[in-house]
Structures are given as structure tokens and as C-alpha cells.
Amino acid sequence: MYEEHYGLEHRPFGETVSPGSYVALPTRDAASRRLRYGLEHGLGPALLYGPSGSGKTLLTRRLALEMGVPTVHLTFPAMPAVDLLTLLAEGLGASVLEVPTMSAVLRRLREALSDHASRGVRPLLIVDEAQAIHEPAAFEVLRLLLNFNTHGTPDLSLLLAGTTELLLQAPAALLDRLTARSLLAPLTEAESATYIEGRLSAAGAREPLFASDALADLHLAALGVPRRLNHLADLSLLIAYAESRPQVDPRIVAIAAREFHCDPLAA
């Protein structure tokens, strides 16, 4: 609606986990480098955790793109262990029986991983929303997958992503093997401003659409959480457009914040 008015090519703050929407930020880049080092060197599993809306899924997808290896991204891991392994095996190109058994799936999965290893490739398994795993057997299976090795290091890289509850739910036997553990905290005020401006620039903005003090207020209202920044920035631009304003000012951010926090679906 407001895109044409502000000369934008598309909505800058639409919900997306496309790697192309990633904005380079110091804390995010540091977390990515730490995770990537451990995963690429086969040192063990890695863990990315943080509050909802902090950008974990986007970061894991960006990381997978940078690593350039076959990747299986599980976004709903709350399932029996055999189903989880079946999805992994199928994602790696292995054919699985219509009614799979644990032994059959493990055999196919091991064959697929050995085939990748023979070509010098270590696939990446990303388990997103891992705090949703409530079956201990599923965590144990993930740990045992790391015992599959052809050349002395695991044939599979494992990245767990979830909220801080994951630290309490994952068994010690798995946490003890972590090669990297990164917290994705809320953005700093400077990062929030860079994030907003980066998303606007990617959408084709040629002029600043947020006053500097409006950016500061936006950070405070969103508590530095990217998902909330998206919602508030989008709503602010819509209000500014409705009022025929050339730029978002603190008053408009205040209006957007009141509307956002009154909407039970916005949280």
C-alpha cells in the first residue's frame, strides 16, 4: 500500500526467512562465524538459542547458504524419533519404506551419509524450534547420529536452534558435545537502526524514511527484537503514509507502538 508512495520496490518489513533479507550486524555475524567454524571442522554439534523473534531461523538459513553443503532444515521437530530420521534420510536423497522401521531407516541413512562422505561432503542438519522436542529418544537419536563417521569426524553436521528453554530440555550427553553455543540476544540500539535502514535500502529506499530519534524510539518500543522491529516499522510507515508524511517521526512511532501492544496477535 505505502510502497509506491515511498518509491519502494516491495514491502521492506514483511515477515521473511529468506537469506536475501539478512542484514549484516556485529552480533549476528559473530554468532554465525562461531557456529560455522565448529560445523565446518567437524568438531561437534552447535547450538543457537535466543528469544522468539530474534532471527534464529534467518541466521541458520543464511549460514547454510554460506556453507554451501546439502542441508536438511527441520522446522517442526516435535515428532517420534523414527519420523525425524525418516525426514532426514529422505532429505538426503535416500528412499525409505512406506512404513519405516528404525533399523531400516538407520541403514538407509548411514548409506546416504557414507555416500556423501566418499565425495568429501558433510551434510548439515538444522533442527529449528528444537525446544519443541519433548521425546527423550529424539534427542538421543540426534546425539547418536554424530557417531556415524567415515574419516574420523562425524559424517553429519548438526545445528540446533531454539529458545532458551532448549538449554534445560536437551540432555547433558548432547550439550557436553557442543562445539559452539551462541546466544542471539536482542539488538543494540545501533544495530536496530542499521537493521531498519538495511531493510529499507534493500527495498529500494533512496531517502531516509525514519528520523534518527524515531529510530531510537522504535528500538525501545521493540526491545531490540527483530520481529517486533518489523511489525512496528511496517505499521509506522503505514501510519505515515495515511497522514501523507514524508518521514516517520517519534509521534508516529508512539502511535504504532500503542496499536501494536494493544493487538494480542502482535506478540
Image (cartoon, rainbow, N blue to C red):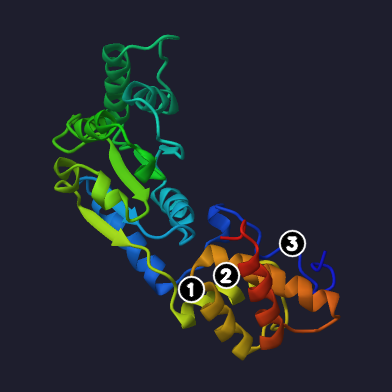
Percent x, y of residue 107: 27, 15
- Mark positioned earlier in the residue sequence (3 or 1): 3
Left or right: where 112 falls relative to 19: left
Question: As shown in the figure, which amino acid type bears the numbered disc 3?
Answer: His
Question: Mark number for residue 10?
Answer: 3
Percent x, y of residue 155: 25, 34
| Foreground of the two, 104 or 156 | 104
Question: Mark number for residue 198?
Answer: none
In which quadrant will I find the C terminus?
bottom right
Question: Mark number for residue 229?
Answer: 2
Question: As shown in the figure, which amino acid type bears the numbered disc 2?
Answer: Leu
Spatial CA span between label 3 and label 1: 23 Å
Question: As shown in the figure, which amino acid type bears the numbered disc 1?
Answer: Gly
| Foreground of the two, 238 or 159 | 238
In which quadrant will I find the N terminus?
bottom right
Spatial CA span between label 2 and label 3: 17 Å
Q: Is residue 123 visible?
A: yes
